[in-house]
Image: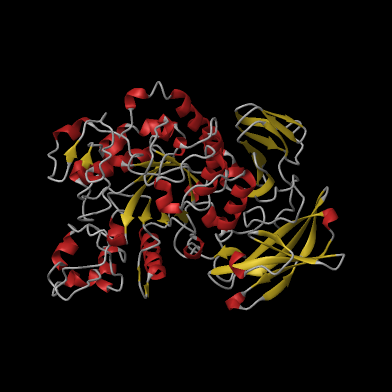
């Protein structure tokens, strides 16, 4: 069991890489940036230095004391951004002769690893609109069906289902079960998505394929006619943009379908130009490498310059086409980004992701690039290409482990992706979260998806402790990151694995789901606060039954408390006179003590944090 965190807002020196502590989060190479650390006055700091590593060599920069407020002093140093990824950490000397290091994992007496240093990222600024956003994930076949859908001729692979039919448990038929949701259905329900507080619509693949999930694309040239074709995507994006919303597409850069036009041209045809697009295991090109050995998903070979030209590089590539006129997608989520370009001795992943980002920037620099990486994503998400990660290690898994019903089955479909769930306490969950986010630059961390669940894993509600759904949703909305609502969560849908979680939305049950829908809208409304869009994070408390943290920016400080059972917790912040912004469950404050009679989530706005102005 992890030791509980002490309750105090200013108990230890603090820096988190946010704009509260860094003068410029989006520097260019050669820019001068000021970084500061907040130190309790009674901590006894006599000297503070910043250790940087220009071109890999450690170097120290002196910090100077800049004043502060009661009980706190600020130390500030000026550093020059020498490399695209510029690491730094603080060394703090005390009057008793001891010294400590402060890095992204926290305060250390012993020398920490370089891998956990804070990081500045030069260039390739993420779009401003992504800060403070809420994402809604759409699986088109199961979201909504327009009137036009019933008149479309189905391909041979499709096994038609009525909208009210359950998902077929026979996995031999699951991918072929076809409900007929389409893009016009999504457009007709934009009111619903926006009403939840979401302003990004993330569409799982829309290209023609031989499955309902469409991750086995047979072409990237057009939108699947079963979804309404190219015109339906243009119409949906235009309607979303008219509402101030954004739309992300989904690309599979690791593999395509075995019916893809490129693969069919090369299969059994060694002389075809497309032969170099894949990894072949025989001279006849009849056996090949595929995603995890699944033969319907042949793996791309990114050694091919022609594959790069057609798919990811330049204005005529697939990546570029759908971001430009007339489609104007606002970015991409890349499927299986962790495996892309990697096969045995090949590791072309850094090249591929940078080419994708460069192409996107050339077409429209105001686009967002997210990559799927189901495990520890930090090594690939240094800010050189991906703006954020779709990952489960830093948020989803710790949250599930803390809020799952004790002794519930371990994992289900979650285990395939991130390992079996376990019974953790709150201190365990916070410790695990801090471990995994330490490797992300701050601006990557704030664009990394906070998902309770997705189309690939069970629904959170399946194993949730009684009363903890509002706690989980609240944490997704208030912790640094991009909150995700997976379609159907707002209806309270269940699902024991990823396939079972892809239930068609019960639009005739809107009234019955009104309370849950209101919950999402109410908590998503918190995202309008600057502290959640831009503010840093400081942990206040973590124990078995409760966690608490502050989100801080120059304009405001929010104190967030989440509990899974009844009890009292001291957060170290006097909340007398603070404004209670939201309370899910019964939570009352008496000074710095919060008391609940069960699972609860609450947010207070307190007097804004004070720091010296950036000159």
Residue 304, horizontal then vertical, whole percent: 27, 73
Q: Residue furthest right?
A: 96
Give the camera-side residue of 445 and 393. Answer: 393
Residue at 50%, 29% in the rendered image: 519
**Image position of 442 (left or right of 611):** left
Q: How is the image coloured?
A: secondary structure
| Image: 359 above or below 166 | below
**Image position of 115 (left or right of 219):** right
Give the camera-side residue of 495 and 483. Answer: 495
Question: Within the image, what quadrant is residue 571 found in?
Answer: top right
Q: Residue furthest top?
A: 511
Give the camera-side residue of 522 and 29. Answer: 522
| Image: 378 above or below 592 | below
Question: Within the image, what quadrant is residue 144 found in?
Answer: top left
| Image: 376 above or below 241 | below
Give the camera-side residue of 587 and 198. Answer: 587
In which quadrant will I find the C terminus? bottom right
């Amino acid at each position: 069991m992890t030791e509980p965190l002490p309750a105090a807002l200013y108990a230890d020196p603090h820096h988190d890489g946010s704009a509260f502590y860094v003068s410029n989060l989006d520097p260019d190479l050669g820019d001068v940036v000021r970084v500061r650390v907040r130190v309790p006055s009674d901590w006894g700091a006599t000297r503070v230095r910043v250790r940087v590593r220009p071109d890999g060599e450690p170097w120290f920069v002196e910090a100077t004391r800049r004043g502060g407020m009661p009980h706190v002093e600020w130390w500030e140093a000026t550093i020059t951004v020498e490399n695209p990824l510029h690491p730094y950490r603080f060394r703090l000397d005390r009057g008793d002769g001891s010294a400590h290091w402060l890095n992204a994992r926290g305060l250390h007496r012993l020398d920490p690893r370089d891998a956990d240093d804070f990081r500045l990222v030069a260039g390739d600024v993420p779009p401003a609109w992504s800060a403070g956003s809420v994402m809604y994930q759409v699986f088109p076949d199961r979201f909504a069906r327009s009137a036009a859908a019933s008149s479309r001729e189905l391909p041979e692979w499709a096994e038609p289902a009525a909208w009210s039919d359950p998902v077929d448990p026979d996995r031999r038929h699951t991918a072929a079960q076809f409900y007929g949701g389409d893009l016009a259905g999504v457009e007709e329900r934009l009111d619903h998505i926006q009403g939840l507080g979401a302003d990004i619509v993330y569409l799982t693949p829309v290209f023609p394929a031989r499955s309902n999930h469409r991750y086995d694309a047979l072409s990237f040239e057009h939108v699947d006619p079963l979804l309404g074709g190219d015109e339906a995507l243009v119409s949906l994006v235009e309607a979303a943009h008219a509402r101030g919303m954004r739309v992300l597409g989904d690309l599979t850069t690791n593999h395509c379908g075995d019916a893809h036009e490129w693969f069919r041209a090369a299969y059994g045809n060694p002389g075809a130009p497309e032969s170099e697009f894949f990894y072949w295991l025989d001279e006849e090109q009849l056996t090949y490498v595929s995603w995890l050995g699944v033969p319907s998903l042949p793996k791309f070979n990114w050694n091919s310059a022609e594959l790069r030209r057609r798919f990811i590089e330049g204005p005529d590539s697939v990546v570029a086409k759908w971001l430009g006129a007339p489609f104007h997608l606002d970015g991409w989520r890349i499927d299986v980004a962790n495996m892309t370009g990697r096969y045995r001795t090949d590791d072309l992943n850094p090249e591929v992701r940078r080419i994708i980002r460069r192409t996107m920037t050339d077409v429209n620099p105001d686009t967002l690039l997210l990559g799927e990486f189901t495990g520890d994503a930090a090594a690939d998400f240094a800010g050189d290409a991906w703006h954020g990660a779709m990952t489960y290690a830093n948020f989803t898994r710790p949250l599930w482990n803390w809020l799952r019903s004790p002794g519930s089955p371990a994992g289900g479909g979650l285990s395939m992706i991130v390992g079996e769930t376990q019974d953790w306490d709150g201190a365990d969950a916070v410790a695990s979260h801090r471990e995994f986010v330490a490797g992300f630059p701050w601006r990557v961390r704030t664009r990394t998806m906070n998902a309770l669940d997705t189309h690939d894993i069970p629904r959170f509600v399946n194993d949730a402790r009684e009363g903890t759904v509002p706690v989980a949703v609240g944490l997704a909305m208030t912790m640094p990151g991009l909150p995700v609502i997976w379609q159907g969560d707002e209806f309270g849908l269940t699902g024991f694995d990823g396939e079972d979680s892809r239930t068609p939305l019960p639009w005739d049950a809107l009234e019955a789901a009104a309370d849950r829908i209101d919950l999402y809208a109410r908590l998503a409304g918190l995202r309008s606060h600057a502290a959640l869009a831009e503010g840093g994070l400081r942990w206040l408390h973590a124990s078995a039954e409760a966690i608490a943290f502050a989100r801080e920016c120059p304009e405001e400080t929010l104190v967030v408390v989440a509990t899974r059972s009844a009890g009292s917790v001291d957060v170290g912040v006097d909340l007398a006179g603070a404004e209670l912004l939201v309370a899910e469950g019964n939570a009352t404050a008496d000074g710095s003590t919060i008391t609940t009679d069960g699972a609860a989530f609450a947010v207070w706005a307190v007097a804004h944090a004070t720091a010296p102005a950036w000159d």
